[in-house]
């Protein structure tokens, strides 16, 4: 299902944190939201996954205004991995992941169990199923929370820095697994090389506004990277995949 953000603004104490943002995520696409610290990425994503109501604008999944849906109906459409999950669950990994089935109550327990098992596999944490959530490392917790989001069987998955806490092998692994897991994805990513390699399209936020949108190759020009991220970027090609990658230097040495 496609996701549309239409003219969304968020204002706090007279300051526009998100300023009339319009962007789209085509059905089934993996779209990245990039921008420097404080550019409004998390604030915008919170509006998408209903953690906050925008002061203006609409968020739609297909034709549904997500802020007008009852919570359970919204949770069947949208799942999220927030940036700082304050998940102090004193539960096992299996119990935490099973919480993702709550919006689907009424289905069979056997089917729920099968979906949880598949999500644990897809997030690469099946071996942790019996562990206590609180005993996990930061990266393991992150992958369990991705499994919980997948058990919701969302049509749209919103990820705020999904590679936080993950080592490089798990960063690549999680992005690959999420990409092939089915839902439409909007993900805030700080690592521009990961964004360039994994995203179908990018939206660049700067000062709460979308300043560029399109395929990574077109969007991440050295000029934009200098103006928005304050870095000098040298573009190189991945020798195997041909994907655009960057070497970065400070703009002012
Ligand atoms: N409740 C709030 N009150 C005041 N300012 C806020 C509030 N929430 C966010 N901000 C400010 O809004 C700006 C955007 O914050 P946001 O977290 O959306 O940025 P971000 O692009 O996700 O940043 P980062 O890359 O550092 O995670 C920041 O300057 C932040 O300090």
Image (cartoon, grey):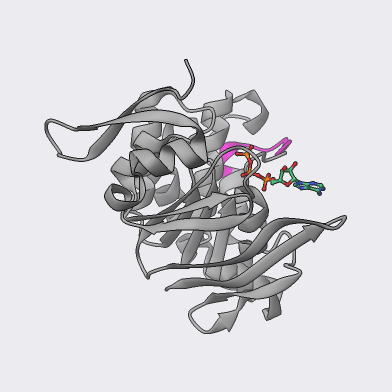
Residue 160: percent from the left, percent from the top? 56, 46
* Image quadrant containing the N terminus: bottom left
Q: Is residue 48 above or below residue 234?
A: below
Q: Is residue 24 left or right of residue 246?
A: right
Residue at x 56% of width, y 76% of height: 60
Q: Quadrant of ligand 1?
A: top right
Residue at x 74% of width, y 36% of height: 88
Viewer-nearest residue: 88 or 189: 189
Q: Main secondary structure of the magenta part?
A: loop
* Observer able to see residue 10: yes
Q: In the rendered structure, does residue 93 fall within the stretch colored magenta?
A: yes
In this view, the residue farthest toward the front is: 252
Q: Is residue 176 left or right of residue 59?
A: left
- Quadrant for residue 44, please give it: bottom right
Residue 177: percent from the left, percent from the top? 34, 45
Magenta part of the protein: which range?
Answer: 87-94
Viewer-nearest residue: 186 or 141: 186
- Quadrant for residue 11, please give it: bottom right
Q: In the rendered structure, does residue 229 fall within the stretch colored magenta?
A: no
Residue at x 48% of width, y 64% of height: 156
Viewer-nearest residue: 117 or 2: 2
Residue 57: percent from the left, percent from the top? 66, 75
Q: Is residue 221 above or below residue 236?
A: below
* Observer able to see residue 151: no
- Quadrant for residue 244, please give it: top left
Residue at x 50% of width, y 36% of height: 229
Say how many tags the image has. 0
Residue 62: percent from the left, percent from the top? 48, 80
In this view, the residue farthest toward the right is: 13
Q: Is residue 240 left or right of residue 166?
A: left
Viewer-nearest residue: 104 or 49: 49
């Amino acid at each position: 299902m496609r996701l549309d953000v239409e003219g969304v603004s968020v204002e706090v104490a007279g300051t526009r944190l998100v300023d009339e943002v319009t962007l789209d995520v085509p059905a089934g696409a993996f779209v990245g939201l990039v921008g420097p610290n404080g550019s409004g990425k998390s604030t915008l994503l919170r509006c998408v996954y209903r953690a906050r109501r925008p002061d203006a604008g609409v968020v739609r999944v297909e034709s549904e205004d997500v802020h007008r849906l009852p919570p359970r109906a919204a949770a069947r459409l949208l799942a999220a991995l927030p940036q700082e999950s304050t998940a102090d669950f004193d539960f096992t990994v299996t119990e935490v992941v099973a919480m993702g089935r709550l919006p689907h109550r009424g289905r069979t327990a056997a089917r729920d169990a099968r979906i949880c098992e598949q999500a644990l596999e897809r997030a690469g944490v099946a071996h942790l199923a019996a562990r206590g959530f609180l005993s996990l490392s930061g990266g393991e917790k992150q992958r369990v929370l991705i499994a919980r989001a997948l058990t919701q069987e969302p049509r749209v998955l919103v990820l705020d820095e999904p590679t936080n806490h993950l080592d490089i092998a798990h960063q690549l692994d999680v992005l690959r697994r999420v990409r092939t897991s089915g839902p439409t994805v909007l993900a805030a990513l700080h690592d521009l090389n990961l964004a360039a390699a994994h995203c179908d399209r990018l939206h660049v936020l700067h000062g709460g506004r979308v300043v560029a949108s399109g395929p990574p190759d077109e969007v991440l020009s050295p000029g934009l990277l200098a103006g928005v991220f304050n870095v000098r970027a040298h573009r190189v090609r991945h020798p195997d995949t041909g994907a655009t990658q960057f070497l970065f230097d400070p703009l002012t040495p």
